[in-house]
Image (tube, rainbow, N blue to C red):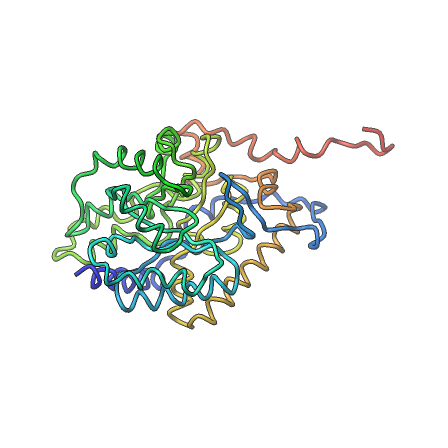
Amino acid sequence: MIGRRKDDHVRLALEQQRTNSGRNQFDEVSFVHHALAGIDRADVSLATTFAGISWQVPLYINAMTGGSTKTGIINRDLAIAARETGVPLASGSMSAYFKDPDCAGTFSVLRTENPDGFVLANVNANATTEQAHRAVDLLRADALQIHVNTVQETVMPEGDRSFSAWLGQIEKIAAASDVPVIVKEVGFGLSRETVLTLRDLGVRVADLGGRGGTDFARIENDRRGPADYAYLHGWGLSTAACLLDAQDAGIPVLASGGVRSPLDAARALALGASGVGVSGGFLRALLDGGVEALTALISAWLDQLTALLTMLGARTPAELTRCDLTVHGDLRTFCIDRGIALGPLAQRSRTVHAPRNLTGST
């Protein structure tokens, strides 16, 4: 039954990728163009460091799948693409492995095919510390994701209905883990209040996992008999909103959910993300064109992201947070309602470049 559900998730996620309107709130974030900001491409590095973690690139393949024969093949191909491009790679939820150890290979293939890469294991917030250790051990994982997904579980016909223990379990896992713990949403977003709570629980990093990409409320509703939770389609905070909301929350954040292009990745990094995760778009490339197509797409994204940093005058992903941004539309309204000051965001470069007069004195 779990394997069938995992296959359903992949099928329905792919259908969403092919039918989505293509717009989300990243479109309401714009860089202020400074015509003389550009630097030399040779001076740009994509390396990023956060919470003691060092990645050569700020892009990663985020959690997708595992637990069935078909999804094991997908994980194999994702691992090959990660190996060939050097991007970190996260497992899908490993709950299926805890219930049926025979499906371990559909997850461990991530490490088998990518022996030297950065791999993240993934468990739910009901997992025990023993299960968390088993997940990390199976993948020889470099970090552990704990996913939180109350909306998905609520709509899922066979989903959890009890969530009050999650805070305690997250704290226990974070305290017992030998690798950094990252808590992620699955597409409904983490508010500032949630990120602050995670920080206090000992979580090292928050993956904001906002609205704008795959909608798991819609997926689970499509799996029901009567599709009676349609009113929850589109629930949650967009990834751009989460990034603005979580500024200076005290722990590093990763951005995932609705990242459609290298420009979205640059926007997310400029809004404060230490890394940017992609799932749906990469899944579509893989299933439509195979591992070669996915590898080519990731390579193109990394090349274009380097080009964007060069154009914007950022030598590293972290320096994108010095670039000026303007916020429009509903996202601007969200910021006003949440008390988020947008003026400084549009004037950040003024604190980097001192004014110079025509005589050369400063």
Residue situated furthest left in the rendering: 225
Q: Is residue 296 left or right of residue 41?
A: left
Q: What residue is at 47 percent from the left and 53 percent from the top?
A: 118
Residue 119 vs 105, above or below: the answer is: above
Q: What residue is at 44 percent from the left and 45 percent from the top?
A: 255
Quadrant in which residue 242 is drawn: top left
Q: What residue is at 55 percent from the left and 52 percent from the top?
A: 57
**Of 170 and 151, which appears nearest the observer?**
170
Residue 47 vs 351, above or below: the answer is: below
| Coordinates of residue 5 in the picture (x, y in percent) | 21, 60
Residue situated furthest right in the rendering: 359
**Of 346 and 124, which appears nearest the observer?**
124
Residue 181 vs 220, above or below: the answer is: above
**Of 61 and 271, which appears nearest the observer?**
61
| Coordinates of residue 35 in the picture (x, y in percent) | 69, 47
Figure quadrant of the C terminus: top right
Quadrant in which residue 80 is drawn: bottom left
Q: Is residue 52 left or right of residue 111?
A: right
| Coordinates of residue 38 in the picture (x, y in percent) | 70, 49
Q: What residue is at 39 percent from the left and 61 percent from the top?
A: 110
